[in-house]
Each structure stands twice: as structure tokens, then as C-alpha cells.
Image (cartoon, helix red, strand yellow):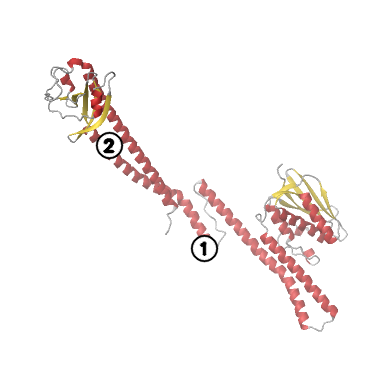
Amino acid sequence: MRSPSLRSRLALLTTAIIAVMFAAGSVATYLVVRQQQRNEVDRFLAQRAVLVRTGGGSAFDRDDVRFGPGAPGGDRPRGAASALFTPDAIAQLLSSAGGIVKVRDQPQLPVAPSDLAAAGATGAPSIALRDVTVAGVEYRMLTTSLGNGTAVQVARDLTESNTVLAALRNRLLVIAFVGTVLASAAAWMVTRRTTAPVRRLAAAAEHVAVTQDLSTSLPQGGPEEVARLGRSFDTMLTALASSREQQQRLVMDASHELRTPLTSLRTNIELLHRAPDLPSEQRRELVDDANAELVELSDLVNQLVALATEGPADEALSPVDLVEVADQVAERARRRTSRPVDVVTTGPTVVVVRPGQIERVVSNLVDNALKYSPPDAAVQVEVGGGGGHAKLVVHDHGRGIPAEDRTRVFDRVYRGASTRASVTGSGLGLAIVRQVVEAHGGSVTLGDEPGGGATVGFTLPLALA
């Protein structure tokens, strides 16, 4: 089942939020208006109750008011009391014993135990408010004690108020519905416009996935976040195109370098196969030559594997003193070659790196210097620091690096024409140096030795104290 698009999700979310806001606003408006109307009714009832309570004898003629069985109940009070019983209200007197006196033709209000308790209350007036239904009509009723064993009940018809509230409720429902529909349409148009750059970006990415054309330029317009995403994708495509180009070049260069030892090895093996009666001296030379080619081939394969698998995630970062690394590599080189390899320190050298990778880098630099230096010449490893960077430079006293080769000595599988025939190697050692150093945020260096030879090294950021 296909999941909803981003545009649909945004539109639905926006519509839902607006619908909730409309609903909350409508409910709040209705409740506020309802409460205001109830407050007005309650004030009206309180005013009428005050008139009765403060009117004294003139409010009701006590001679005409009789409670109990056989009470006339329907007699209309005279004098000021008649003004209390206008058509907009219903009133009746209530005794604590349950006797009732009401105005003629007015419906009798219901009496609850709390009303009887209010009639019998003495001291401060007791007031109770509640909604009642009389003859199918809803009333708001107030009961307050008169302090002499009686209470007055005043009620007002809520029909008109309820009609107004019903009309308000219907209008609010219509407003909320129409507003939600309009908001949904607006949200759909806005999200369509907002997500248009994302759709263009997705279409371009799908085109790249289908055609494998990494040179495709992705759209970078739209809001800042989308434009930033487009730039990131464009940068990624550029990196992928560069990586593909490097891979293709590596395969071509590696195939060229592999072809030479393989051809030589095959020639020697065929010769040994065709001429089983070769003199032992010639046979020994062919076997030694084949063994040398195998060693060179193995070295080339190992270097290719190292170059392909060397990456920033192979091991954890940790503080490393380049002096200690240089001492270890120099000691191994001295034991292996019996040649002098000196280490000179000139400053702080602690860096945060992946130890195994940096040791490989220093070892490649020292091996390279030993390879191109005369057998009796010393190799010097200079380690120092300053200005926020640590530096390691290996000095050799060989023939130096020709000017035409300096721009390519760090390329993969590259060996200068002047050294191709005289020096064996895979041409990958310095390529590994550059790859590892740049992965650690550093840079490689290349120069000339004043007395003849070359200086090859790198710089890395010093570890923070």
C-alpha cells in the first residue's frame, strides 16, 4: 500500500490543526455567551428576590397569605407585590412546612428539600440557584429565605435564551465547517507550492538513479532548507563522480602495473616448461626472477587492498605522539635494512589520529626514502610542531624528484619515468600517505633537500591541550 505523500500529510496536518482551532474557538464562544446569559438571568432573579425580601409587609399582604391545607393559593397579592409578578417571571411563597402561595394562572414551581430548608433558615438569607422544568418548559429558579420561616421562589423562562443559544450554536457550526473547508483548500495550495522544489529534487535524483549520470545538476531553488538539501545532493554527486573517476583511473593504472610482473612471470614459467633440460644456473636465474616478480606482485596487491580499504572508520581516534611513532618505525627500518635512520624532534607533536593508519603513513615515507637514497646515506625523520599543527618530514639524499613528476607523485600507481626502470615498487605508497593524511584533516608536503635529495612529509592539527 502506497504511503501518503509529504504534500498530503502536510495538508491534512494543517487542516486538522485549523479544524481543532475552529472547534475550540466555537465551543469557547458558545460557553462564554451561555454563561453571560445565565449571569444576566441570575442577576434578574436576585433583584426580584431582593424586592420581595426588602418590601416587608407591603410586598405581600399577610392577611391574605395563608399556608396549609385549604389555603387559597391562587389569590394574587395586592399592592407592591403585584409589580413583582410580571409576565417575565414566576414567583411563589414557600413556608418551611411546605405551604405554597402562588399567583393565579402561574404554574407552580417545584419544591425540593433544600428549598424547605431555606424557608426555615434564620439569620443571613440563604440563596439557592438551579434549573428546573415546569410543564415542559425550562426555567432558571432562585430560592431565598425571608428570615421569618418563609422563602420566596422566583423563576424565569429560559426559552428565549435557549433559542438564542441554539441559533448561535448552528451559526458557529456553519462557520467552523466553512472555515475548515477553506483552510483545507488553502493548505493544499500552500503545501503544493512549498513541496514543489522537493518534487523537482526527487525527480532529478530518480533520473540520476536510472541513468547513472552523475554529471546531472540538481535543482537548488526553493526555501532555504530545500535549497540546502539540493546543494548537499549536488555536492554528493560531485564526490561520487570524482570517486568513480578515481576508481576507473585506479583500475587502469593497476592493470598496467599488474600486466608487467604477470607477463614476466608467465614468460619465465613457459620457458621453464618448454625447456626442461636448461642448465641449473639458468634454471636458478629464472626461478629467482619469477620469485622476485611474485614478491612485487604480492606487494602491489597488498598496497591496492590497503588503498581500497583504508578509511576513517577502521579504528578509533586517540591522542598519539608522532615522535613515538617515528621512533618505532625508524627502529624497525634499522633492523630490517641495517641502515641509519635518525629521528629529530623540534616541538610538540601530539595529534588525535587513528594510530594504525598514521604508523602506516610514516612507514611508507621511511621506506620510500630508503628506496631512493644511496645505500650508505642516512635517512632523517624530522618531527616538530608549532602554529597549531604538528609536522613530520622525512629527508633522503637520493636523486630528488624531477619537476615534471612533482604534481603526480602522490597519485595512485604513479612512478616517474626516471625511476621506473631502476627502482621497484607499486607506486601506491605515497597515494596511501595522502589519502590517510587528508582523511585526518591534514596535508602532504614535498620539497628539495639542500644537499641533494627530497623531503616528503605531512602536517596534522595538534591535539587541544
Q: Position of residue 367 (x, y in %)?
A: 79, 59
Q: Position of residue 112 (x, y in %)?
A: 23, 30
Q: Is residue 308 visible?
A: yes
What quarter of the picture does the N terminus occupy?
Answer: bottom left
Q: Quadrant of residue 315?
A: bottom right
* Residue furthest out toward the top: 57
Q: Position of residue 206 (x, y in %)?
A: 50, 59
**101 or 77, which is in the foreground?**
101
Residue marked by disc 1: 210
Residue 77 as seen in the image, left or right of residue 206: left
Q: Quadrant of residue 127?
A: top left
- Vertically, is 273 above or below 206? below
Indicate which label's residue lies in the foreground, 1 or 2: 2
Secondary-structure class at tag 1: helix
Secondary-structure class at tag 2: helix
Q: Residues within 10 Å of mark 1 (few under 14, many from 20)?
A: few
Residue 133 as seen in the image, left or right of residue 434: left
Q: Is residue 142 visible?
A: no
Q: Residue at x 74, y 71 (%)?
A: 260
- Amino acid type assigned to the residue bearing label 1 in the image: Val
**309 or 419, which is in the foreground?**
309
- Amino acid type assigned to the residue bearing label 2 in the image: Leu
Give the Cα distance between marks 1 and 2: 59 Å
Q: Are marks 1 and 2 in contact (CB under 8 Å)?
A: no
**131 or 286, which is in the foreground?**
131
Q: Residue at x 43, y 56 (%)?
A: 3
Q: Position of residue 126 (x, y in %)?
A: 28, 23
- Vertically, is 337 above or below 272? above
Q: Residues within 10 Å of mark 2 (few under 14, many from 20)?
A: some
Question: In terms of sequence position, does the residue under pointer 1 or pointer 2 come before the other?
Answer: 2
Residue marked by disc 2: 168
- Vertically, is 132 above or below 462? above
